[in-house]
Image (spheres, grey):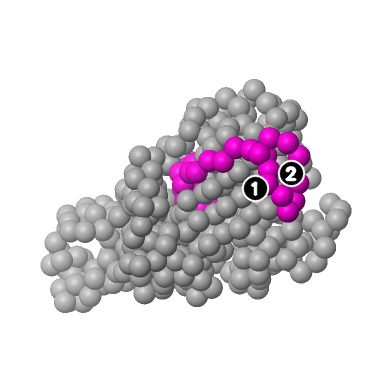
Amino acid sequence: MTERERQIMDLLRQDPMLPQGELARRLGITRSSVGVHLANLSKKGYILGKGYVLAEGREKYVVGIGAANVDLMGRSRAPLVMEDSNPGFISMSVGGVTHNICENAARMGAPVKLITAVGDDIYGDRIRRECQAAGIDTSGFLVSEGDSSSIYLSLHGVEGDMAVAMSDMRVLQKLSVDFLGRRHVVIRGAGAIVMDAGLPEEVLEYVAATYGGEVPVFVDPVSTAYAKKLRGRLRGIHTLKPNLMEAEILAEMEIRTREDLEEAAGKLLAQGLQRLVVSMGKRGCYYRDREGLALTVQGEPVETVVNATGAGDAFMGGLVYAYLRDMPPGEALPFATAAARMAIAHQNTINPNISAENVWEVARRERLACRSC
């Protein structure tokens, strides 16, 4: 934002209905110059629609940019036997990392808009319907004619832990920089942006470079394969949530001890991140930010895992919701951890009972709290 644009915004904060002539008089410039500045502020997303409605005065919302797909999940009724048919339970639901994060945040009470690509098939229709039912704005969907919607297939052992998975998310490559550029005002007006690393590299770089200085960008690497796209490209990202294997890829080092983890965190923060949250499965998470705050979360041990697939997505959804509600890290991390615990306690990837109230209840019941480290 230029200095002149800042002056105009200050005046509009005091009176959003000021006419262009009055703005020009107060600033000592021509009316045509005011018009140019107002047009630029609109393009940048600071002004929404007519009447100089300021984006900052509206309710904070989340914009998700990334995968939404159909999840096919199989869970064995006995120990898995590879290269053989295993009796078990098979289910289908709507998933995708960015979708899952967005739905969790929406169910907690955050306004959410999802920008994704789907095919013109029955799976794309189902994705849209279920998003709308969860309260997610789907007006940003790209429907790619002749393409199949994304599908994620996972196989789980008798205890619920994933054994192997496969994804076909080729349609997501249709989500281009040009397509996002046509949604600039919506993206720029967000209180937070969520992305997953399954996006094309040029899209990841575009969002971080274009919006990272103004809007907090939350990124989930998704997998070790996708994490490679982010290596050396962390500037503009506010919060990154890798697991240990993804953190190793990003930091280009093995992480075997707490000292290794601290060294890796320092390397990643030095590349431009504001916050790093490393998920460590049953061992909880490790948080570090640019101010030097380092935290872990402690609580009652997890006794039963029904479905571990959505734990990380629920955790990130909790982090995003907490950010929109201005929770400090000491509150946000137990909240996000409780959301993850709710996820693994339900057969569905997204626990339909998740809400801010229920998440806080889990955090209290399981005595989740932060510890400095």
- Seen at 60% across and 37% down, the residue is 89
Which one is in front, 314 or 60? 314
Q: Which residues are magenta?
A: 76-105
Identify whether 366 is placed above or below 337.
Answer: above
Residue at the spot of label 1: 155
> For residue 86: magenta?
yes
Q: Residue 87: image x %, image y %?
A: 66, 39
| 2 or 1: tag closer to the N-terminus | 2
Res 130 quadrant in image: top left
Q: Residue 293: give its label.
A: none
Can residue 203 be spotted in the picture?
yes
Q: Residue 309: image x %, image y %?
A: 61, 45
- Seen at 17% across and 56% down, the residue is 51
Q: Give the residue type that dot 1 points to.
A: Leu
Q: Residue 135: image x %, image y %?
A: 36, 41
Which one is in front, 13 or 84? 84
- Badge 1 element: strand
Residue at the spot of label 2: 80
Determine whether, in the image, residue 310 is placed left or right of residue 98: right
Give the residue at the far top of this rendering.
365
Q: Give the residue type that dot 2 points to.
A: Leu
Q: Residue 349: image x %, image y %?
A: 55, 41
> For residue 329: magenta?
no
Contact check, label 2 and label 1, Cβ < 8 Å: yes
- Seen at 58% across and 69% down, the residue is 235
